[in-house]
Structures are given as structure tokens and as C-alpha cells.
Amino acid sequence: MSEKWDSNSSESWNHIWSGNDTQHHWYSDINITYVNYYLHQPQVAAVFISSYLLIFVLCMVGNTVVCFIVIRNRHMHTVTNFFILNLAISDLLVGIFCMPITLLDNIIAGWPFGSSMCKISGLVQGISVAASVFTLVAIAVDRFRCVVYPFKPKLTVKTAFVTIVIIWGLAIAIMTPSAIMLHVQEEKYYRVRLSSHNKTSTVYWCREDWPRHEMRRIYTTVLFATIYLAPLSLIVIMYARIGASLFKTAAHCTGKQRPVQWHVSKKKQKVIKMLLTVALLFILSWLPLWTLMMLSDYTDLSPNKLRIINIYIYPFAHWLAFCNSSVNPIIYGFFNENFRNGFQDAFQICQKKAKPQEAYSLRAKRNIVINTSGLLVQEPVSQNPGGENLGCGKSADNPTQESLIEEMGEATNSTVA
């Protein structure tokens, strides 16, 4: 499998196995090293399996429900929601192709599938990860335009689809070199013990076979820059600008406030915290894995350190990175009032349980939240004989920003205070 996303296929195994409960035998002056088929004790393997199973279930259920909600509800067919739908699809691919194969790679020795599966799985793994990261950037750009530049033309649905096509095109282009270089290779000096009856088997690895090691380093650096460093910089910069813009408007809401004004101010503060949470989660989820991959290519580690990194640290780093695909539907979906309402609509819960007047109130509120035309439904304006502009309630000064706050503001009700 692609060694960019799976640890045990690295070339360092010829050093690691020599210190990993192995036996050496000599045949025809060739040193043959025998290794166990299972890399860990049952207790450790059980921890790995349960941990990966947890994020796999969360990823599958969460992203499937997000896809169902957006596709089922026509009023959810907006630019932002289409980006979230694309994020859910790419995260589903991460769950289907990356999580099980990486788990298998972390608990057994060798590549159990054929050469075609080696290239296909490696390509799909890389594409799904890249598409997920690029979609996070697209969501940040969409929110940035709506809040910081509310009077500029909004992105259209057609533009969103073109952006999604570009996202997948870039992901394919970036990961194609890896797929070309992926090959199933036989380990000449290692064999796997299959059972206690001394049955052994040849060890095969699915890994990139570059003509020169420098080319591999360059490619890893390019991936690091395009899939982590550049997206991280864009997300942090744009969310920082969004937070500064919301904080600036929220700072005006001091002193005596009407209840509606105080509610909007608190909602802006929650949005700022949510944006900070999103950026931090992205940084923390992917930083350990990219750090390990860069260390593997640019440093000469001792065999003992390589063994510890590949056997124990790499699985945790992969697990942490894949957690991002599991929490994305929670951050961008279920903590968003649009998706909670869409979930109710899809399963027709509100019509069965809500009273008529409550259903009408919920529908009226929902119409405000999902307004995507750039026009804001005005709340009743209290009498203000002096004509004073309080600058904290909803107004025509920044309708798109307030609409986005309505959409994002509820996202932190269950996560951040």
C-alpha cells in the first residue's frame, strides 16, 4: 500500500525486524530472518482494532447521514452544504479505503493483496485524503468571502461544482506519481512464520520504488507543502480574519443591550471559538503523521527508534489523522442547526411530534437560518424615536455576515461554552 499513508511498508523494516522477536537461519550463505505473522501480542492488537473500529463507525455513520441529509432536502442545496457534502464523500472514502487497510498493515507483516490492489488502494487512499483537505480549504474560503467581504458576489452553485471538480482533479494529479511508483516487492531475506508448525511464507510489500532516494524526498516534501502546510496556512489565515471581523462587530455590543442584540453578540463569540476549534483540530490531527513521514525521509534513526516509531507511534499518528474524518461531520454537520433541522425533515420527526404552533415557529426560524439569497428576514424592530443605530442587531449593513452567523452560530452549542 502507499507508504505515504501506511507505516509498515517502509524500507526501514530490514532494520526493525532484526530486533522484533526474530530468528536467524543460514541457507546458502544467505541470512534469512523469520518474523511473526502478527506484529503484536493479542492485547495490543485488540487495542488497535477497537480504536480503529471506533473511528471507522463514527466516520461511516456520521458522513453517511450528512450525505443523506443534503441529498434528501432540496432546501439544503446551497454552496456551503455542497462543499460539506463533498467533504463527507471524501471522508467516507478515507474510512472505506484508509482505515481498514492501515489497521491491517499495522497488525500483520507484509502485503496480503495483489499488485493491482496495491496501486488502486494507494491511489484511492491518497486521493481521498487530499480531497478531504482541499475541501476544508474550500469551506474556509466560502465562509471567508461571506463574512469578510459580504457585499461581493456570492459563490454560485455552478461555481461550487466547478470547484469540487478542481479539488478532485488536483487530488488525482498530486497522487498519480505515487501510484505509478507503487509496486509489490518480495523481501529476499525475510520470511513469515505462519503457525507453530514452522510453516513459512514469502513476505511481500506494497511500496513506492523510486529510482533515487532524493526523488522520494522531493515528492514527500511536495505532498507536505500541498496537503498540509499550504492548506493549514490558508485555513488559519482565513479563520483568523473571520474571527477578527466577528470580534470587531461583537465588541460594539457592550453596555445596555436588547435581548436580541445580546444573543447575536454571544453567538458571534461562539462562532469565533468554533473557528479556533476547527483550525486546532486540523493542526493536531495531521501534524504527528506528517512529522513522522518527514523524519523518516530526512533523518537517520537508529534501528531501535525505527522499530518503536513504526510499531507503535505510526499507528497512533494514523489513527489521529483519520479522527479528523470522523469528527468533520460533527463539526460541520450535526452541530449546525441547518443539519439538525434537515435531519428532522428527512425523517419527518417535527411533523409527528411538534404542535402546530411549534412547527410553524420552527419553520419560520429555519427559513431565516437557511436563507442563501443574501437577503435577511428582518426581525421586528423596536421603537427607536431617535433613530439610533445600535449596530448589534440584524440589519442591512451586513446581511450575509448575520446569515452566516445564524448558520454557524449554533455549531458550538454542544462543544464550546
Image (tube, grey):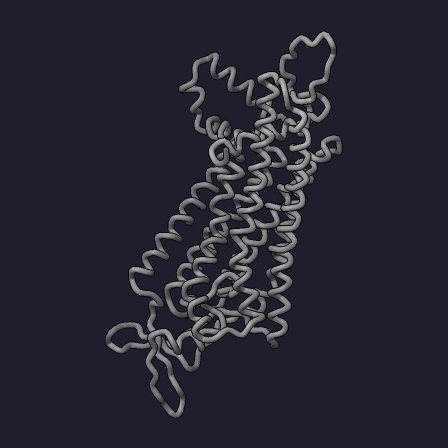
Q: Residue furthest front?
A: 255
The number of numbered badges drawn on the structure is 0
Q: Residue furthest bottom?
A: 29
Which residue is pictured at 60% across the width and 55% down the height? 228
Which residue is pictured at 44% across the width and 58% down the height? 316
Residue 287 occupies quadrant: bottom right
Which residue is pictured at 56% across the width and 37% down the height? 273
Seen in the image, is 192 located left or right of residue 257? left
Place of residue 301 in the rendered image (x, y in percent of width and height, measured from the top left) = 50, 73
Seen in the image, is 13 located left or right of residue 148? left
Q: In the rendered view, would you say 65 is above or below 134?
A: above
**Closer to the camera, 343 or 47?**
47
Which residue is pictured at 72% across the width and 31% down the height? 150
Q: In the rendered view, would you say 121 is above or below 269?
A: below
Q: In the rendered view, would you say 268 is above or below 183?
A: above
Place of residue 285 in the rendered image (x, y in percent of width and height, measured from the top left) = 51, 52
Seen in the image, is 335 located left or right of residue 175? left
Seen in the image, is 347 located left or right of residue 71? left
Place of residue 177 in the rendered image (x, y in percent of width and height, measured from the top left) = 61, 65
Place of residue 384 in the rendered image (x, y in percent of width and height, measured from the top left) = 69, 9
**Closer to the camera, 190 or 385?**
385
Q: Residue furthest left?
A: 197
